[in-house]
Amino acid sequence: MNEATQILFSLLILNSAVHGFSEVPTPANVSILCHNFETVAHWNYPEPSLKPRFFVTVNGYRGGAKEVEKCFNITHQHCNITHLILLSTEDSYFVTVTAAVGSNKSAGEESQEFTYNKNMVERILCTLDFPPVNLSISDGVMAVSFTHPFHIYRGALGKKKKKDVDFSYSIFTEEEGEIKESKFNCETKECRENVPVPESEVRHCVEINGRLDSFFLTASEKNCYDPRKNAGMNSTYIILFVAIGVLVAVFLAGIAMVVFRKLTRDSSSLPKMMASVISQSRIGGNTMQPESTSVSEVQVSPSGTTPLLPTAEDIAEDKPVVTGSTMPLDRSRFPIGEEGGSGGLTESCEGSGQQFSGSGEEQEHSIVSSGYDRPKFTVEISPGDHAEAYRSAQA
């Protein structure tokens, strides 16, 4: 057996002794990401073609080992163990991951120990974010304000009450090239503090960290205040608000104008409509009813009387037409005869009619009283439309 073969055989024996002669490769690079009480374990696997299944166990310094039920016999290569860490946030832990292919299992691969408790010395110290900070500067004083971290992380603090939680923080400012630390305590929901700063018109940045019981709070980045930038932002907001206000006013004015025009147009057309309805009602008719087809009664003259209008025969024979009087054809006036003479007229009034009698040739053309001298009466031509007519003379 040559030297190379001996070395290889020795390595195989050593690997079998360490992993219990397992044929399944062990998971590698088990790492822990823990921040703001959110804790997740990640790992790699050297032979993914074997399609292994993984089993995760959380080991506590005080609570012993606990299998993670939702990460038991899984195929993905990560596991959220937050719910187990929150059972005791002040304890320290490490994670063990085991792979299995078929009925064979690999040896467990462990992570580094980690904790949220700043009083325990472990390889990984998990941290919490400091609450968002508001800054403002006026008259050489920087005002710092933020929400007490108890109200942000109270779900992870179990049954602890605010009065039982100790909170302190430090503000680091730079003054003339030197870092200055100012320490404060807070017991109210809204923490406020003033820090003196030189030259209010220049940009100032502060760093803030704190301690909530045994948990360490750090700001993810510096908090800075630039008076020139904030002034520019304020002017931009003012212009934006003014522009929005103008647009809203124009829009409302347009709507008001449209409504006003509609109302005035409707009110001006109303009197015309009412006048039309009233005029129709006065003549006794409905504007929606058809015209009456009734025809007035025609009065027929009895025999022996002369019609008021010439007939077609009279016009054809070119005979003079007499309409109840001895008026000449020019109809300028009536001739007046002597009473009782041969050419005179005898007038007698009987009842409501009048008769005229003559002699000789005039008797042949006996003349009756004019139709316009007869009694009048009213005839309804159509509903609401009346006219005057004359009664015919009696034979």
Image (cartoon, rainbow, N blue to C red):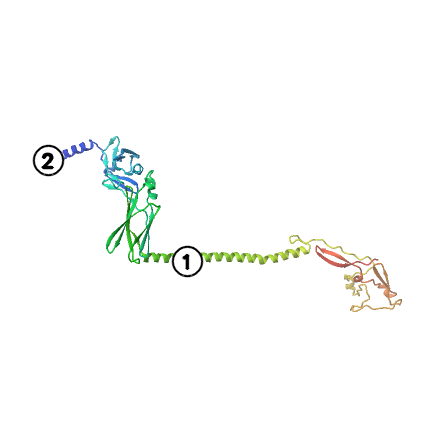
Question: Residue 82: horizontal and vertical position, in percent?
Answer: 30, 38
Q: Nearer the viewer, residue 324 or 169?
A: 169
Q: Nearer the viewer, residue 332 or 268?
A: 268
Q: Quadrant of the C terminus?
A: bottom right
**SS assignment at label 2:** helix
Q: How much space separates mark 1 and mark 2, taking CA atoms? A: 88 Å
* Residue type, numbered disc 2: Glu
Q: Is residue 84 above or below residue 147?
A: above
Q: Is residue 247 visible?
A: yes
Q: Earlier in the sequence, mark 1 or mark 2?
A: 2
Residue on which disc 1 sits: 242
**SS assignment at label 1:** helix
The quadrant where residue 311 appears: bottom right
Q: Residue at x 48, y 56 (%)?
A: 252
In the image, taking residue 9 as reference, residue 295 lies left or right, namely: right
Callout in the foreground (1, 2): 1
* Residue type, numbered disc 1: Val
The answer to the question of whether label 1 and label 2 lie on touching residues, with beta carbons closer than 8 A, is no
**Residue extending furthest top?**
103
Q: Residues within 10 Å of mark 2 (few under 14, many from 20)?
A: few
Q: Nearer the viewer, residue 252 or 148?
A: 148
Q: Is residue 218 visible?
A: no
Question: Residue 55: horizontal and vertical position, in percent?
Answer: 27, 34
Question: Residue 193: horizontal and vertical position, in percent?
Answer: 32, 50
The quadrant where residue 279 appears: bottom right
Q: Quadrant of the N terminus?
A: top left
Q: Is residue 27 above or below residue 275?
A: above
Q: Residue at x 60, y 56 (%)?
A: 270
Residue on which disc 2 sits: 3
